[in-house]
Image (cartoon, helix red, strand yellow):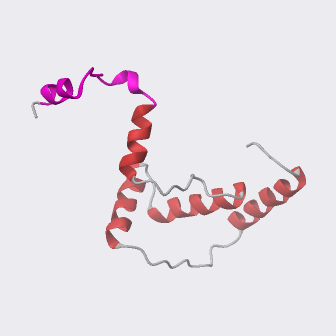
Amino acid sequence: MVYIGNPMCYHMVDKEVKRMTEKAKDTRLSIRIDPALKTAGQDVAQDMGLDLTTAVKMFITAMVKEHRLPFEPTSLPAETIQALRESAHHQDYKAYDTPDEMWDDLNV
């Protein structure tokens, strides 16, 4: 982990995370979530060998330990994010000289 700022503060955070994880599990977290999103989250967690509760605990633990969200929030649509990822590997995709050449290749 890379620390920026006062290392003593991060030491205190590490101690707090350790204390919280060692403490008896006596708090329940209740959230409202779309049923389809919950099911999709359960499927993804299960694919990783986790249950949704463990995945949420991992998320919160990382957020507390790093003092930030464990991902970069964005307002971009999922399709745009995927296109940006693909553009980083543009050499893996076929290039066309003209739009007509592309449409002909796609049989459109």
- Residue 43: percent from the left, percent from the top? 35, 57
- Residue 53's place in the image compared with 9, above or below, is below
Please state the total of marks drawn on the protein image: 0
What is the magenta range?
A: 88-106
State the residue at coordinates (84%, 59%).
12
State the residue at coordinates (79%, 46%).
3
Which quadrant of the structure image shows residue 38? bottom left
State the residue at coordinates (84%, 54%).
11
> Depth check: 35 or 99 in front?
99
**In the orientation shown, which residue stands out farthest toward the left?**
107
Check if residue 95 falls in the magenta segment.
Answer: yes
- Residue 79: percent from the left, percent from the top? 35, 48
Q: Quadrant of the N terminus?
A: top right
State the residue at coordinates (45%, 55%).
50
- Residue 22: percent from the left, percent from the top? 71, 65
- Residue 82's place in the image compared with 11, above or below, is above
Q: Quadrant of the C terminus?
A: top left
Q: Is residue 99 left or right of residue 64?
A: left
Which quadrant of the structure image shows residue 63? bottom right
Check if residue 103 falls in the magenta segment.
Answer: yes
